[in-house]
Amino acid sequence: MPLADRFDGFLVDLDGVVWIGREPVPGAAEALRALREAGKPIVFVTNNPGKHPAAYAKRLSRMGVGVVPEQIVTAGMVAARLASEADVAAGRTVGAFVIGMPALEEMVTEAGARLLERDVAQEADVVVVSGHRGFDYRELLAAKRALDRGAALVATSRDPTMPYPGGELPGTGAVLAAVETASGRRAEIAGKPERHLFEIATQALARSFSGNGDEKEQANWRVAMVGDRISSDIAGGRAAGLETILVLSGTTSPEQAAAADPAPDFVLEDLSGLLA
C-alpha cells in the first residue's frame, strides 16, 4: 500500500520539498497531482514570506498543481496578523517597522498596521523581521532603537538558511540573530515550528475536508506534515500532534535524518516516495 494511503490529508512545505529556488524538485508536481486525484486534501505551509499566498498559488498552478490561495499558509501572513495584534492604546493603529521583502510589508499593512519608514522606526509598536538580501546596518540600528523603546518583536522564523541551487542562502534566522543580539530581545515566531502557523493551516485543512464532503470527526483524521527541515517541519509537526514525513530533497542529509531529534515518522527521498 502506498504511504499516501495511510493518511487523510497533508500539510506540505514548499522550499526544499516542491521546489529549490526557481527549480521544481523532480517528481514533485506529479506526486502532488496524484495526491489531489486520489482525493487527499493538501494545504501548503511555508516559512518563506517573500510572496503573497496568491503568488504561490499561481506558481503551483504553472506546475500543473491547481490550488487556491486559501490552501496556502505562509509565515509572512501569520507574522502580519501577529503584528496587527500588538498592544497599543485604544483607537490607535499599530505602527510597524518591517525588515523584509515588499510582499511582507504589504501583508502587514493589509492586516491593519501602519508601515513606518526607517527614519521614524523608533516610534514603532512592533518590529517584524524576515530575511531579505537588502538587510544592512541601518535596518539593524533602526530595529534596535524601536526595540529599546519597548516595541514588540515578531519574526517569520528562525530558519538559519533556505535551500537554493548551488548552495543554501542565509535565511531569516541569520538576520534575526543580529536583531536579537543587538537588542537583547527574544522574538515571537510566526512560522514553523511554532503553533501559530499550524493552527491556521489545520483550520484550512479542515475546510478542505468539509469541502470534500468528509464528515469524519477531526480527532480521527490522520494528517501528516511533509517537510525537509527537522527543526521546523518535523519539530513543529510533532508539537502540533501530527505524524511527520521528512524528505531529503532539501536541507537535510541522510546522516542528519538518521540522527534527527525529534525523529520523523517516515523518511523519503522526495515527494514521489508517498506514492511508493
Image: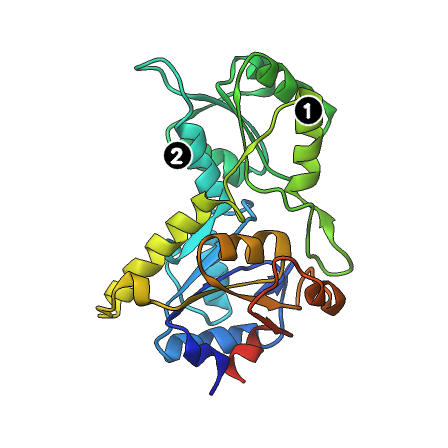
Image coordinates for residue 189, horizontal then vertical, percent: 53, 38
Name the residue beneath numbered marker 1: 140
Query: Tag 2's secondary structure?
Result: helix
Q: For the residue marked with disc 1, what is the amino acid?
A: Leu
Q: For the residue marked with disc 2, what is the amino acid?
A: Glu
Q: Is residue 86 above or below residue 227?
A: above
Q: Which mark is residue 36?
A: none
Name which residue lies at 51% across and 77% down: 31
The quadrant in which residue 220 appears is: bottom left
Density class for disc 2 (Cα within 10 Å; few <14, some 14-19, many ≥20) is some
Q: Nearer the viewer, mark 1 or mark 2?
A: 1
Name which residue lies at 37% across and 72% down: 8
Q: Is residue 51 left or right of residue 168?
A: left
Image coordinates for residue 250, horizontal then vertical, percent: 67, 63
Name which residue lies at 51% across and 40% down: 103
Image coordinates for residue 133, horizontal then vertical, percent: 69, 39
Q: Is residue 104 above or below residue 48?
A: above
Q: Is residue 204 left or right of residue 144?
A: left
Q: Is residue 133 visible?
A: no
Give the spatial CA distance, label 1 vs label 2: 24 Å
Image coordinates for residue 71, horizontal then vertical, percent: 38, 58
Name the residue beneath numbered marker 2: 110
Query: Tag 1's secondary structure?
Result: helix
The quadrant in which residue 77 appears is: top left
Q: In this view of the protein, which residue sits in the foreground, 169 or 240?
A: 240
Q: In this view of the protein, which residue sits in the foreground, 77 or 114?
A: 77
Location of the C terminus (image quadrant)? bottom right
Number of numbered discs overlaid on the protein picture = 2
Q: Is residue 220 visible?
A: yes
Name which residue lies at 56% across and 54% down: 235
